Image (cartoon, rainbow, N blue to C red):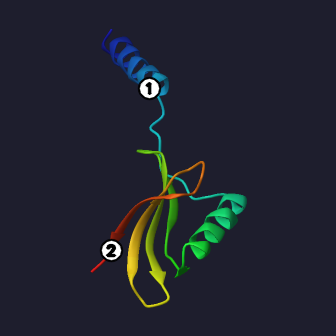
């Protein structure tokens, strides 16, 4: 009986795990999205940047260490539909 009980418990836990909703995760841009984002960044005066990812908390595009020609670094958030800069934080 103990084996049946253990097996039933394991199956119930497995079913709950499979039935749980997927946890949304940040993702990198597709090649097409990256090209559009890079064009928007260049148009805004940025010359280089580090990581680009779609943050599922917004959603918004999160750009790390975007650099201007004078060497200033910013962390940026871009609207996912318009690529407009919605937040600009100067890094120290």
Q: Residue at x 46, y 28 (%)?
A: 21
What residue is shown with label 1? 20
Q: Which mark is residue 72?
A: none
Q: Which residue is mark 2?
A: 90
Q: Residue at x 41, y 44 (%)?
A: 57
Give the class, few, some or many, for how many residues have Cα within 10 Å of label 2's Cα (few <14, many ≥20).
few
| In the rendered image, the vertical position of residue 20 relative to residue 24, given as above or below | above
Please tell me which residue is depicted at 55% across the width and 72% down the height of the picture: 44
Count of marks placed on residues = 2
* Farthest-out residue, top: 1
Provide the secondary structure element on which disc 1 rests: loop
The quadrant in which residue 83 appears is bottom right
Q: Are marks 2 and 1 in contact (CB under 8 Å)?
A: no
Q: Can you name the residue that lies furthest to the right here?
A: 32
Which numbered mark, 2 or 1, is in the foreground of this view?
2
* Nearer to us in this view, 25 or 34: 34
Residue occupying the point 71% across, 62% down: 31
With respect to residue 40, does 42 lie above or below?
below
Q: Quadrant of the C terminus?
A: bottom left
What separation in Å lies between label 2 and label 1 (alpha carbons)? 39 Å
């Amino acid at each position: 009986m103990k084996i049946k009980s253990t097996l039933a418990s394991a199956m119930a836990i497995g079913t709950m795990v499979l039935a749980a909703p997927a946890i949304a995760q940040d993702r990198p841009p597709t090649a097409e999205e990256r090209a559009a984002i890079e064009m928007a960044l260049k148009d805004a005066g940025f010359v280089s940047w580090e990581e680009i990812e779609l943050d599922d908390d917004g959603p918004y595009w999160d750009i790390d260490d975007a650099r201007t020609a004078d060497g200033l670094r910013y962390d940026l958030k871009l609207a996912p539909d318009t690529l407009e800069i919605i937040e600009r934080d100067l890094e120290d």
